[in-house]
Every structure is written in C-alpha cells, then in structure tokens.
Image: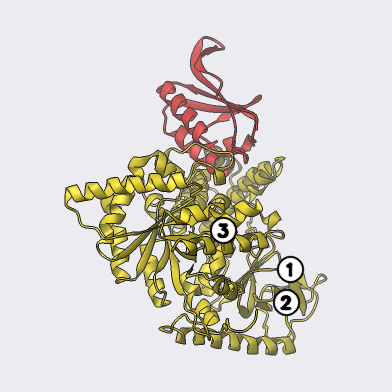
Chain colours: A yellow, B red
Amino acid sequence: MMVLEGKSVFGGIAIGKLSVYGKKDHAVKRSRVADTEAENKRFLEAKEEAKRQLAGFYEKAVKEVGEVNAAIFEIHQMMLDDQDYVESVTNMIKTQEVNAEFAVASTGDNFSAMFAAMEDDYMRERAADVKDISNRVISILQGSTAGAITGEEPVILLADDLAPSETVQLDKSKVLSFVTRHGSTNSHTAILARTMNIPALIGVDFPEKLDEAPSGESCLSGNVAAGTDNGASIDGMLGIVDGYQGKFYLNPDEETLAKYRKLKEEDEQKKRLLQELKGKENVTLDGKKINLYANIGGVADVANVLANDAGGIGLFRSEFLYLESEDYPTEEAQFTAYKTVAENMAGKKVIIRTLDIGADKQVGYFNLEKEENPAMGYRAIRICLDRKEIFKTQLRAIYRASYYGTISIMFPMIISVAEVRAIKEIIEEVKAELDRDGLPYKEVEIGIMIETPAAVMISDLLAKEVDFFSIGTNDLTQYTLAIDRQNPKLDNIYDAHHEAVLRMLKMVVDNGHKEGCWVGICGELGADTELTETFLRMGFDELSVSPSMVLRVRDKIRNTDLSKNE
Amino acid sequence: MEPSEEEAIGRFRKGTGVIMQELKYVIKDKEGIHARPAGAFVKEAAAFPCSVTIAKGEKEVDAKRIFGVMGLGVKCGEEITIHTDGEQEEEAIAVLGKFLEENL
C-alpha cells in the first residue's frame, strides 16, 4: 500500500480500480504498400473522419465547458488540414511506399519534435496536441477506438492533468473520481468534478509503477506484466480517494479497504439523509431562519434548483444569453428566457444579475479591446453604463418578464453611488417606455452585488439607494487579497476565510440592515459549511449556493444552535 | 508594459517591383501567439484569396498554415510583420490588423 497526499477539490470517497489516462503512443509497424494512391486515399479518408470526430467534440465541449475552452478542437481540426502536415504524410506514402499509419506516426513525430524544441514552455506542451491528432488518425486507420476508459466498470481516473480535449471524450458515467498530478483548484478537471459531485484530488505525485504485489481483490487485467524490475503498472490496481482528507491510497491493504468501505457507506447514508431534508425549513435549533437560494447559469438549471428544493434563485447569471449567440441577443429572446425561469419558479424569487462580461470573456460581437488586466477593466456595469442601448434592451426584457413571477435585479461590479443613481435613471426611462407601449410589469426589487472593496467601504451610502445587497465573495476575495484565483502557484496563500474578507462581510451586513436592506451571499463562500454558523451569527438574510449544495447547507443550518456560546 | 502600436500600414516595394501590403505589429498579449489566437488568425487569413505571410525576424511563414504560425513562437513584446499579396490584399491587411488589435 502506498499513501499519497494531494489537494482536494471536492469531498467524498471513491473506491475502485485505477485507470491511468494513457497518452500512449500507438504501436505502429512499418510495412510496404504497392498501391500508394489507394493508401493515400485511405489516409485522407481517415483524416476527414478524425475531423468529424473533433467537430463532434467541439459541440459537446461548448455545452460542457464553454466556447473558450472548446476552441482547442477547432485548432486540432485546423492542424489536420495544415498543408505542410498533409503533404508530409502524402509524400512519405508515395515516395517511400509505406503504410498510412507509419507515415502519420512519422509526420506526427517530426512536427511534435519541432514544438518540443521550442524555448517556450507553453509551445513545448503543444507537442502533445500534434501527437494527439496523429494518434486519432492512426486509431481510425487501425480501426481501434480511442478513449481512456475501455472497461465496463467505473474507475478512478489518474492523469498528469486533463485538458478539456481529454475530459470531453470521457464517458462520465465511468468515472468515480479524478486524481491528477497537476492542475489548480480552478482547473477544468476540478470544475468538472464539482459539477459531477465526485471526489477529486490534484497535485498527487503518483508513480507509474508500484513494486509490490497487488493486494485485496484487485485483479490485474491480463495485459499488465506484473513483477518486472520496476514493479507492476498501477493501471488496474485498486485505489481509494479520500476527498475529505486529501488522501490517495494506492493498492490499499485489507484493513484500510474495510475502513473506507464503512466510511463510504456512512457517506452515502448521509447523502440519502440529505434527500430527506427536502421540504424542511432552513431554521437553526434555536429558531433562526435564513433564506437558502440557488445560483444558476441558464434556463436548463431550473430543474436542478427545484429538485434540490431551493427557496428561490439568488443569482441568475444572464451571460449565457450573450455567450451563446452570434450577435446581441434580442429583447424577445431575453424576455422569453427570463419569463420561462420566472414561470417555472412559480412565484419564488428570481434574482437576475445583469450582464457581467468583460475582456476576459470573449464575446466577439462586443468588439472589446484586449486588455492587460481584464479583471479590473472594461467589464460588467461599466460596459452597460457606457453602452446604454445594450443595457436598456436587457432591462426592458427583465421588466417585461417581471409580470410573470417575482423578479429582482442586481447589478455587478458597483463601486460608487453615482453608478447606482445612473442605473436608476435608466430604469425610470425603461419603465416610462413600457408604460408608453402599454406593456405590463410588476414592482422589481433592486439590488447590487458587493464584490469590490470600494462597495464594502461605502456600503452605508449604497444601502440608502437599493433594496438588497448580494456579496460576490469570489471577486471580493480576489480584489481584497490581490490574488489571481486562476494562478495555481497562489493556491497555497489563497485563504477564503481570510479575516479581512470576514470583517468586510460583517460590515456589509450591518450597514445594509441599518437602512433596511436585506443582505445575502451568492459567491462560493456561501456554500462553505465551515462558515455557515459564522454567517448566521453575522445576521445574513440569505445564502445562494449551487443547486447541489442546497441540502447540505440546510443540514448544517438545522444542526446549528446559536444560543450556545461561540 | 511598453506601449505597442501597429506601426505602419502601407504599400511598399519588395524585390522586383511587386507591390504588396505590409503591417508591423507588436504583440501585447502576455501569452504571445498561443494556440487559440493562432488558430483564429489562420482562419481569418485563410478567408482571403491573396497570399498572407507572417514573419518574426528573418523567419517568414505562410499565415494560412497553423503549424507555421505556431512554429514562430511569437511572444509578448515581439514584433511581427504581415504581408498580403494579390487579390483583396488591402481588405485582408485591414481585417488582420483589426484582429491583431483586438486579440493580441
């Protein structure tokens, strides 16, 4: 047994066979072909099939991880069409009279060697892309299926790191857990694990081979050679992922296995219990109530909100409307989306956050200029107040939808009272227009996101202007600690529970309440059950979390007793 | 970061009287011309009938071939030169210049 440590990105326990994600080079034999024309045709057909597969991955990835991350598949298709690449393969087939597999493999090696020789780390890594596309063509030529998981049984997937290009091909129902050597807590794999609700560890330096006999019931699959000089491949061995403790057990002994089987059972029982919490109130043992809402990023998420019994939608990110379309979404398209959500929520509160894009999110038709520091750049409300026509279209759609349910609006990235007043003026214009057009709307609560340190410091002034505050802890923490959350090198100093942030939260609650505003949290911190009691004591009125976290947080609230000393 | 602007758009003579379009641009994106923008750039270039080349220093490649463009390994702060030659060369240089401004 070998015990390794890593950083957990999602809790839970997984026990199962290990499958090492193989970026294995295909074994390709050189053989002589007589009919080189036919062989070249075989290559060209395989290349087209590879492009069709990649186009399919692109579509799938857009849905799973968004357009920006999916772009890699377009690049892979372009690589396959690169004239230098195609000519190299064709020439090799024709002049050397070799089989297509060999010509593709050699060409792939040559092109990837070019990248491997470059001085830039990033470009060196692109050698893997070339191998990837070449292997895809070879697989097709050989009639073998690509993909990491071949067996029927779900596995714990081990990899250096998984790029979107790799995760998209995985059969998600066959993955019990992810364990990677690299990656950050915000990497693609981590995000995927959280959406799948499965345990995952990053930064685990697992070995390729283990010099010990497999224990327990880990039957080695036939093709694994055991007992070589460097030990046996870990592929096919048994493993345990403990997402609570950040531990990975390789080839666990019977005692450990027994312990974790029991823990896993308890864990599952707890999940079942959570299901029983549906329909129960969010109330502490001593009677304090709080609203528990869910965050969504599209109309399709509403089903999940209802399944998890959230009391409303605390954050409806409206970006999807802009990211999924080729041009500015029309008022009608937006109205339909907001109305659908409002109707499906049947009178429960739906808080729509207005457009929050910027130079870091690529929306072509906005023609945003490239910025050095997009997190602090031309984004969100700054764009909306600058390009009023876009903003007014969205506001009109929201107000029209308000007639069909209980809608609130909140505005992102606020830093000043003047911004809020400018927004309110525009809202008045919109309402006047709707009156003129004879279109019905209801009263809409107006709130702002508190996600800049500036908004925190003047929250007493802002509170006089609005009905509610919702704290976006992700950006607020990033701006307060001056830490880029995307940078894995900083994961070790990124402290979500930093005293500076906690004090800000308290300050916002107090300032909001003084002016009669209700105050909530819609950032990731809201789902952090280690802080649930703290939030309750601070006096928060609402927490909005991802749908899958609603019942866990409810369980925590119902087991908290604020009458006891801290 | 030092200011970096596209320096010149204009006609010039190279070799034996061939007239083509030239554009110089200093890359601002801190990651340089990595895979995604390289792919997008190649796509833009391939949409034009004229020939399009991209050069860094002495090395000049066909801008319609992604391996060539990525192979240049252009990093932030480095200058590239684009040449377009043939049918629609003026439109091509304008579109590509705008693309560079917005994306790189």
Seen at 25% across and 56% down, the residue is: A400
Q: Earlier in the sequence, mark 1 or mark 2?
A: 1
The correct choice, above or below, for A424 with respect to B46 in the image is below
Give the SS element for disc 2.
strand
Q: Earlier in the sequence, mark 3 or mark 2?
A: 2
Separation of disc 3 and disc 2 at Cα? 35 Å
| Chain label for disc 1 | A
Within 10 angstroms of label 2, few (less than 14), some, or many (20 or more) residues? many
Quarter-of-image position of residue B35 = top right
Pointer 1: what residue?
A: A206
Asked if marks 3 and 2 fall on the same chain, the answer is yes
Residue at 72% in and 86% down: A256
Looking at this view, name the residue that lies furthest to the right.
A229
Query: Dividing the image into 4 quarters, which one contains the N terminus of chain A?
Result: bottom right
Q: How many marks?
A: 3
In the rendered structure, which amino acid carries the disc numbered 3? Asn
Between residue A373 and residue B62, name the one nearer to us. Answer: A373
Q: Residue A155 vs residue A551: left or right?
A: right
| Percent position of residue A560, x then y | 57, 82
Mark 3 or 1 closer to N-term?
1
Which chain contains the residue that carries disc 3? A
**Number of the label disc, if any, that sits on residue A250:** 2
Circles 3 and 2: CB distance less than 8 Å?
Answer: no
Q: Check disc 3 and report its element: helix, strand or loop.
A: helix
Q: Are marks 1 and 2 in contact (CB under 8 Å)?
A: yes
Q: Type of residue at label 2? A: Leu
The residue to which callout 3 is attached is A474
- Which mark is nearer the camera, 3 or 1? 3
Q: Position of residue A423 (x, y in %)?
A: 38, 47
Q: Please tell me whether mark 3 or mark 2 is closer to you in this view.
A: 3
